[in-house]
Amino acid sequence: MTRTKRMNSFPSPDTPKRNKNSIRKSVEDEYVEDEYVENEYTKDIETDFVVTPKRNKRINYNEGAGTITPKRNKRVDPMVTVLITQKKNEPLKSKTHDIVSNYANEAVTPGEQPVVTVLITPKKNKTQIPKQIVTPPSIRRRTGRLSSSIDNRIQPINKPLTRYDIAREQLRLEEVPINFPCREKEYDQVYNKIKESIDELNGRRIFISGQPGTGKTATVRQVIKNLKEKVCKKELNPFEFVEINGMEIKPPEKAYSVLWEGLTGDRISHKDAEFLLNEMFNDEDNEVSIVFMIDEFDSLISKRSIVFNNLLEWTAIPNSGFVLIALTNEIRLPHSLLTKSQESKFRLERLDFEPYTHEQLFTILKSRLENIEIFAKEAVEFTARKVSAISQDARNALCICRYAVGVLEAQVKNKFVSENSYVTIPMVLEAIKKTNTPWKRYISTSSLRVKVFLCSLLLLLKESRKSGKDEIEFKSVIRKYNKICEFKGLPCPPLAELTNIAYDLLSSSMLIMDPSKDVDSLIKFNGIENDVNSVLSSELFFKDLVG
């Protein structure tokens, strides 16, 4: 039995194929005899092939008459003229005939092209929304934007009941007053610089230096609070504000991820954050300014750090809108970290906050206690003079007054004084004893050798900061320690004892060092110098050293 090869059978021309996008060949002569009139949209050629249109093309054929519908996603003119093509010797039919009959005569001469004018309502231009900062899902770890401290301060506070509660609320460090006394000039400078950068979408580098407690942080927060209110009133372009403390960011590269988390609420690695921030600031379509404030800037940035250079480079990018505000306690810090070429390139803008005098401290306390009759005038003046003589820190003055209010409240409850009494000088003295910080208590209860070690370290830091260094070699501290002991007539301790003192201070987070390098390690002071100076200056042994 032989097999015969199966021949391919051609389907009937009347049988359509399943694929509607294919070309179907016509074998009947009636398709060849039909002639089409050319129009401005299509140019028909006499052929044996009839092309079936694809579905995604918005062209509807009604028995030879084509109606072209413009796509929705394309802008069209308000008035479009459509030419309807018909077959020869045939009238227009169906819906096309109805449309044409409303605008032209029903008797259409064969071969002519009827014109239909279609009125199309143009789309309204939508208001442009600023481009949002989004983290790629592949590197996102946690979502949910964190609320900034500034937003929390803008929220209203429940009204206290007693006069003691009112006074304590007005004396809170976190309370941003409406009027900021004794810093009007500095406030205007910071306000104008930041507002100008937001309006023009330009980068800026603002370095604010001054002793602790001179109003640097409070001034910037007050400026941001007022600018946020202008944004709510639609008087200023929207902007983002992120605030960090340099003492809480270890290592310095963590500043990238903290900044990105403040902008988006997503926690990512510092390498990914650095890459995304670089892409964002180099984006030409960037429309949002970012104000980044770094408090305690000197404890975060060193001369060898790349973070400092990257932050400056981002501010120099055109239309980046990145405003860097660095708050530091050192006057010469910005210039000590930059070379001459960098200084000429970035053009740092510096503001120096002078220490408060006792008259200014008195004015600040008086403005906080306005309309509250709870302090005697001599008590407020005594507090201002006492703080001015020790630290010139306005925060200490506010803390002492808050504790003094608590002392008055306790004496009123115990019926030692009447309810209408005022805070007096003895109450202020009692409050000063309670305001000793944990650092002060730790230092005051330490041994003499620990105090000499801290004194040696601080004396070396004062000398090294003149050259822009904030780290001291351990062996340099040992040499300074031995010189103080010789000057005071004390025996020099062995190296092992000084090493144990350094390790104890390291465990208490007062020092930062690498124990593995022993005497060659670099020591960085991580405590509050004013607390150390106040404790040492109160002792007769250190008065001629600390001054």
Image: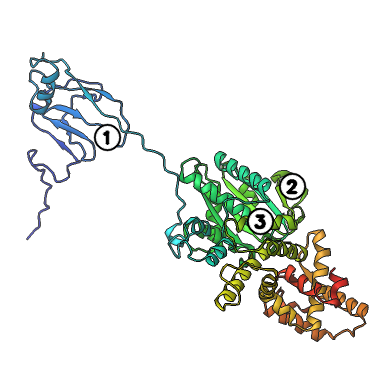
Please name the amino acid that badge 3 sits on: Ile
Image disc number at residue 106: none
Q: Is residue 40 above or below residue 165?
A: above
| Circle 2 residues within 10 Å: few <14, some 14–19, many ≥20 | few
Give the mark nearest the N terminus, 3 or 2: 2
Report the label total. Answer: 3
Label 1 – label 2 distance at C-alpha: 56 Å
Note whether residue 289 is visible. no
Image disc number at residue 71: 1
Quarter of the picture containing the C terminus is bottom right
Q: Secondary structure at mark 3?
A: helix
Nearer to us in this view, 452 or 461 = 452
Image disc number at residue 364: 3
Image x and y of residue 494, in percent:
85, 86
Q: Is residue 31 above or below residue 430?
A: above
Image x and y of residue 473, in percent:
80, 72
Q: Residue furthest top?
A: 109
Callout 1 touching callout 3 (CB < 8 Å): no
Nearer to us in this view, 39 or 120 = 120
Residue occupied by mark 2:
343
The answer to whether 3 appears left or right of 512 in the picture is left
Which-is-in-front pick, marks 1 and 3?
Answer: 3
Give the mark nearest the N terminus, 1 or 2: 1
Please name the amino acid that badge 1 sits on: Lys
Q: Is residue 128 above or below residue 70?
A: below
